[in-house]
Amino acid sequence: MSVVATARRHAALRWSGVPLLLTGFALLAFGIYSTVRGGPWTNIPLGLLSSGLGLSAFGANHDTALAYAQEAYEGPERSQLDDKLRGELEAELERDRDAMHDLRPSPKVALAMPFVAVLVQAFVSWRLLG
């Protein structure tokens, strides 16, 4: 798979983190509610964890997409980058060039994060909803 195709895949996959973040917030709110109603206090940290993993799913795929896009941008595949991904990359390079050059892709972690988030949220849901 080409570097550009991999960047596109992770750019698309990062959006799985948005609904995971929203369901994580819902689980956090329900965890707080259940604790106030006499449930175990551990529901709150589990809700925080499920929210954080949703955000991590987005962040890991976002950083991986940008790292691969930068690799393509600086290499022979530059012309294959679509305008949206190139624009995102150029905006990030303009904002903090040093941090972008230090960015390394983590494709295995990025692909695993949404699944880990779903598993943890399923566990938290099971725990809260019985």
Image: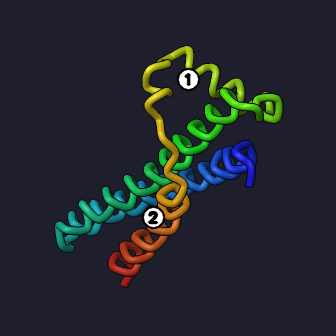
| x and y, in percent, of residue 83 in the image | 79, 28
Identified at 27% across, 68% down, the residue is 34
Q: Mark 1 near mark 2, Cβ–Cβ under 8 Å?
A: no
Residue 22 visible to an observer of this rendering? no
- What is the secondary structure assignment of the residue under circle 2? helix
Where residue 92 is drawn, which disc sits there?
Answer: 1
Residue 109 visible to an observer of this rendering? yes
Residue at the limit of the structure toward the bottom, as seen here: 130
| x and y, in percent, of residue 49 in the image | 32, 59
Where residue 9 is drawn, which disc sits there?
Answer: none
Identified at 56% across, 50% down, the residue is 18
- What is the secondary structure assignment of the residue under circle 1? helix
* Residue 99 sits in quarter: top left
Which quadrant would the C terminus be assigned to in this image?
bottom left
Identified at 24% across, 61% down, the residue is 45
Identified at 63% across, 35% down, the residue is 71
Q: Amino acid at mark 2?
A: Ala
Residue at the limit of the structure toward the top, as seen here: 94
Q: Of callouts 1 and 2, which one flags the residue occurring earlier in the amino acid sequence?
A: 1
- Report the side of 98 relative to 72 (left or right): left
| x and y, in percent, of residue 38 in the image | 18, 72
* Residue 39 sits in quarter: bottom left
| x and y, in percent, of residue 98 in the image | 44, 20
Q: Which residue is mark 2?
A: 117
Label tally? 2
